[in-house]
Image (spheres, rainbow, N blue to C red):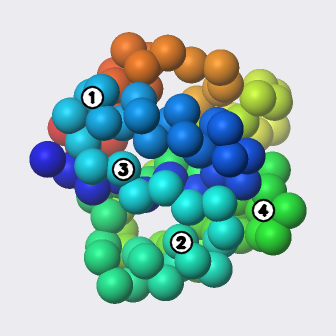
Amino acid sequence: MKRVLVIEDDPDMAELLGHMIQMNGHEPAVFIAADEALADARANPPDAILIDIMMEQMDGWTMCEWLRQITDAPVAFISAWRTGENAERAKTMGARFITKPLSHYDLGRELNLMLG
C-alpha cells in the first residue's frame, strides 16, 4: 500500500479524494492546510503527491517547490481550471496535471502511472 499525500483546501473535495485513493488500494494522507501537509511530508515521506493549484494559504505551484525540498515523490496538480498554461507549467515542473471532476477510475489510472 502506497502513501498518497493530498493537499486540497476544499474540505468536501479533500474528503472525496481521500476516499477515492482508498478505493484504489492506497493510504491517503489528506490535508487542507499547506503548513500541516509540509510537516507531515517531513515526518512521513509520501510515495505520491496530489496538490490543488488554487488554494488560499499557498498556491499549488509554491507548495510543490517546498515539497521538492523534502521529497522526490511524483507530483500531480489537480484543478478545475483546464488551461494549456496550467498543464504546461505542471509539465515544466516535472509533474502531471489532472482536471476535476474525476472518477476514482481516472484517479487510479493516474496513481498507477505515478507509482508504476
Which amino acid type is shown beneath numbered disc 2?
Answer: Ala
Locate residue 62: give its quadrant.
Answer: bottom right
Q: Label 4: state its secondary structure.
A: loop
Residue shown at the point (81%, 70%) measured from the top left: 57
Front-most of 71 and 41? 41
Q: Is residue 32 above or below residue 1?
A: below
Q: Which residue position is annotated with label 4?
A: 59
Which amino acid type is shown beneath numbered disc 1?
Answer: Asn
Q: Which residue position is annotated with label 3?
A: 28
Residue shown at the point (49%, 56%) measured from the top left: 30
Q: Is residue 32 above or below residue 98?
A: below
Judged left or right of residue 68, residue 33 is: right
Q: Which residue position is annotated with label 1?
A: 24
**Label 2 environment density (alpha carbons within 10 Å; few <14, some 14–19, many ≥20):** many
Cα gap from disc 2 to disc 3, whole angstroms? 12 Å
The answer, for residue 36, to whether it is visible in the render is: yes
Q: Earlier in the sequence, mark 4 or mark 1?
A: 1
